[in-house]
Amino acid sequence: MSAAPRVAIKTFGCKLNQYEGEQIREDFEALGFDVADFGEAAEVHVINSCTVTHRTDRDTRRVSRAVKRKQADALVIVTGCYAEVNPEVVEALDSVDIIVGNEDKRKIATMAADWLAEHRELTVSAASDGHERLVHHFRGHTRAFIKVQNGCDANCAYCIIPTARGASRSEPMPAALQQARLLVDGGHPELVLVGIHLGRWGHDLPGPAQTLADLATEMCSIPDLGRLRLSSIEPREVTEELLAMVLAGGRSLTGDESLPGRGRVCRHLHIPLQSGCDATLARMRRPYQSQFYADLVARIVDSNPHVAIGADVLTGFPGETEEEFETTRAFVAALPVSYLHVFTYSERAGTDAATMPDPVNPEVRKHRTHVLMDLSARKATDFAQAAVGETLELVVEGSHNYLRVDFEGPEELIGRIVAVRVEALVDGKLIGDLC
């Protein structure tokens, strides 16, 4: 009896892509493939690409070439946003055999099985396109993602994702809840709701109006769910209902079951900023001004200083002068946020920003990115220091608000939720004791 063919899958980019990478993996497993770590020998290599920046495009090209150099007869499939937006560029690579757009990801396993049967005389189980199959387990992860929304109707000047992902669309609540139950049953104590424009969940669903807060409330009623985390939410979509759940987060230690979300929603919000300068925000076509963002963050922190708040910031957008960048730096320095995700602006063909005048020198862009990354590191240290003396509810991998704490305990705690008292911050690491 011959060994089953092997597949290796590499996913770049956002949490949505990570979820879809797990779907692809389970589709292959359903057809009888064994899953190899990427870089190991395998008959099939799938690269689930991202195209947010030039760097992510380059990563796809680099990895595909590395696979072919190491294993010339392997089948290399590229899917994801780079394949969607620039298929002609990917097709020109001599290291890629098959290109698959985002909407056909669930067909990849079948396509690979058919290719192996034709070219290698290798057969696997009867092929199925897997459209109704949900993810049962995130391989190698304690925390699991749930795709509840896809696409984006916003019109930010720099962003190519609406081209790659299409219009905003929501997963119906029954399907989202079914997926959540499967992952809870699969042993994941924390679930993360993800989407391209997560705050728009429900706007396109038929029937009575539904909101992301409604979905979160229903998910928090799932038996055995440890906790629920929200991924990135636009500033104007942090509703009072969502905020009440986040502010109540972590209070399950008190046993108060009357709180919104019963204390299961993590004390964490990631709220994209992009710039602290109103002139830059206007050119970006972001639908708010800096004062709105500052007021929102202040309101959250005043209500609960232990809520972790992350922010995306984009440096080097066309026309960003030294004065505009300094306005952003000073604005962010004054914000009580916990960390930053700093991105260097990268021209994306097809976006309005790509043709804007006054591009910023690439070396200046990089310098500004490093300035804000240093600022982010200081903010993360300050936030961690503020946790000393607190008792946190942790998944033995990460905390309720994305703080990481080292503590001693038996290995069987891995994947469980425990209470840990934070005792000190030593060399940038929080040290705690199991309660």
Image (cartoon, rainbow, N blue to C red):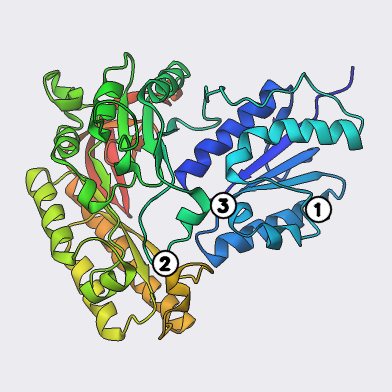
Q: Which residue is mark 2?
A: 158
Question: Dot 3 surroundings within 10 Å: few (below 14), some, or many (20 or more)?
Answer: many
The type of residue carrying mark 3 is Cys
Residue 294, image x and y in percent? 14, 60
The type of residue carrying mark 1 is Lys
Q: Gap between marks 1 and 2, in whole Å?
A: 33 Å
Q: Earlier in the sequence, mark 1 or mark 3?
A: 1
Q: Which mark is drawn over residue 330?
A: none
Q: Which residue is mark 3?
A: 81
Number of callouts: 3
Depicted 16 relative to depicted 286: above or below: above
Quadrant of the snapshot with the N terminus: top right
Residue 104, image x and y in percent? 63, 39
Question: Dot 1 surroundings within 10 Å: few (below 14), some, or many (20 or more)?
Answer: some
Q: Earlier in the sequence, mark 1 or mark 2?
A: 1
Locate residue 37: give its quadrant: top right
Depicted 47 relative to depicted 120: above or below: below
Q: Gap between marks 1 and 3, in whole Å?
A: 21 Å
